[in-house]
Amino acid sequence: MAVNRRALHDYEILENIEAGISLTGSEIKSVRAGKVSLQEAYARPDHGQVWLQGAHIAEYGPASYNGHDPRRSRRLLLHRAQIREIEREVEAKGLTLIPLRMYLNNRGIAKVQLAVARGRKQYDKRQVIAKRDADREMERALRQRTTERVR
């Protein structure tokens, strides 16, 4: 449904977590229609719960006056032990919780894939881009070499 591509560029992913998300009726209809943006979203633990902040779920037109606020905080559904572990990691190590993608599982339930991540510095981002380009060039050269042998 929605993918946060920028997150893989800006953060070093340390751990992935799948969480349910508590949505209203008009919100789930918008999610099913694919009207979701996770670009500026993040999650934060707060008093034994984890909240998704800054995610934009567009208003559902046919919902009339019973619509929803597109940028409201939404509760993420996790086990208590997971929440405690996340709280410890985020507070002690200075890590961040970011949503990587939102999707519907095979039963039609909305899920969010969260990542415990560390922010990258500008020079780290350049190194990652340079490594990715070098790997791409190597793959391209290998492909050309194998196609020349086949001919």
Image: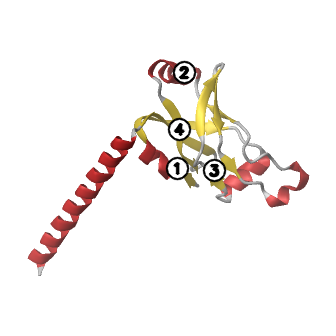
- Tell me the mark number nearer the camera, choosing from 2 and 3: 2
User: Mark 4 or 2 closer to N-term?
Assistant: 2
Distance from disc 4 to disc 1, alpha carbons, whole Å, reads: 9 Å
Amino acid under label 2?
Answer: Glu
Label 2 residue SS: helix
Image colouring = secondary structure
- Tell me the mark number nearer the camera, choosing from 3 and 1: 1
Above or below 80: residue 105: below
User: Mark 4 or 3 closer to N-term?
Assistant: 4
Q: Which residue is mark 1?
A: 4
Label 4 residue SS: strand
Label 1 residue SS: loop
Q: Which residue is mark 4?
A: 98
Answer whether labels 4 and 1 touch (C-beta < 8 Å). yes
Identity of the residue drawn at 19% across and 68% down: 143
User: Mark 1 or 2 closer to N-term?
Assistant: 1
Amino acid under label 4?
Answer: Ile
Amino acid under label 1?
Answer: Asn
Residue 57 location (% of width, % of height): 70, 50
Q: Which residue is mark 3?
A: 108
Distance from disc 4 to disc 3, alpha carbons, whole Å, reads: 23 Å
Q: Which mark is residue 87?
A: 2
Identity of the residue drawn at 59% across and 43% down: 111
Above or below 1: residue 93: above
Distance from disc 2 to disc 3, alpha carbons, whole Å, reads: 29 Å
User: Mark 4 or 1 closer to N-term?
Assistant: 1
Identity of the residue drawn at 72% across and 42% down: 23
Amino acid under label 3?
Answer: Gly
Distance from disc 3 to disc 1, alpha carbons, whole Å, reads: 20 Å
User: Mark 3 or 1 closer to N-term?
Assistant: 1
Distance from disc 4 to disc 2, alpha carbons, whole Å, reads: 14 Å
Q: Nearer the viewer, residue 150 or 91?
A: 91
